[in-house]
Image: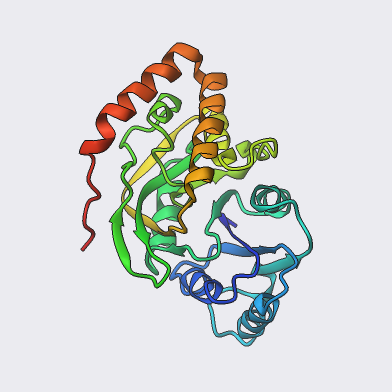
Amino acid sequence: MKVSVVTVTYNAEKALPKTMLSVLNQSCYDFEYLIIDGNSTDDTNSIIQEFENRVQKGEFGISSEQYRWISEPDQGLYDAMNKAIGLAKGDFIWFINAGDKIFSSETLQQVVDAIEQNPNVDVVYGQTVIIGQDDEVLGERHRVAPANLTKKSLLDGLVVCHQSVIVRRSIAPQYDLSYKLTADYDWMCRVLDVSRKNVYIDGYLSKFQTAGLSTKRRKQSLKERFVIMKRHFGLLPTLWSHVCILIKYPFVTRKRVY
């Protein structure tokens, strides 16, 4: 099958159903749905089982074999995503975690079409809509995905949202668990190190739910990302990129989405 769509979740009983519906209601059925739960203590597992029953009854387009899930303790988000990489069977892997949504019911078909039209593609990516806790649309990300994505593009930060990038599973590395807040940035750098071809879809692929970080965690995140950037790009390019980001950031406005 072409794509393994993965949802990582933990105690997300309120946010999870809309995420799962956005995946299961796709018009394209060439995917498996893999749910990785971190041993939730709320009704998350009941929700997953309820959807499993609905899949078995034929309510959605995929078969029972295309719907898999586990629930067990983990070491956090990135550890759960590592489990998904190990369990996935699709040619490509796409993380749509609890609270996030695939943009529309036709989006997966766009992704599959892009893969089939570009045999050497390793990364398919596009734009992202930001939504709030109540599903309200807040606009595009401040960082807009470039039409020509390379590793150097990441000197401007994580310019492509993790929920809007689909990666060939054979090149997808494990997340580095030594990074607690920005392992996805390091992961994207390593993916683009080896990717043969990156294909841009000029449109929205996902809706990303912003949860907001405390000031303390934001500072920790920036420090961690600086360490990762320095490792991938060197000290001087990293310093210069931060100067440019500081200069540009006050003038960046979030594009309204209609």
Kindly identify the residue that appears in the image at 52 percent across and 59 percent down: 96
Query: Is 72 located above or below residue 41 in the figure?
Result: above
Q: Residue furthest right?
A: 72
Quadrant into which the C terminus falls? bottom left
Task: Classify 17 as above or below 106.
Answer: below
Closer to the camera, 165 or 208? 208
Q: What is the quadrant of residue 187 in the picture?
A: top right
* The N terminus sits in image quarter: bottom right
Q: Decide: is 201 above or below 12.
A: above
Left or right: residue 4 versus residue 119 is right
State the image coordinates of residue 203 (x, y, percent, origin top left): 30, 52
Q: How many marks?
A: 0
Residue projecting furthest to the front: 216
Q: Is residue 162 above or below residue 188?
A: below
Left or right: where 179 falls relative to 195: right
Q: Position of residue 175 (x, y in %)?
A: 65, 40
Residue at x-position 40% and y-position 69%? 105
Q: Residue furthest bottom?
A: 57
In the rendered view, does 195 fall on the left or right side of 200?
right
At 25% from the left and 31% from the top, the residue drawn is 248
User: What residue do we see at 41% from left, 24% from top?
Assistant: 152
Figure quadrant of residue 6: bottom right
* Rendering coords of residue 126 (x, y %): 37, 47
Residue 7 in the image, given as x and y percentages of width and height: 59, 62
**Foreground residue, 101 or 224?**
224
43 to the left or right of 15? right
Q: Nearer the viewer, residue 111 or 70?
A: 70
Q: Compare residues 89 and 81 and report the one nearer the observer.
A: 81
Look at the image and name its color scheme: rainbow
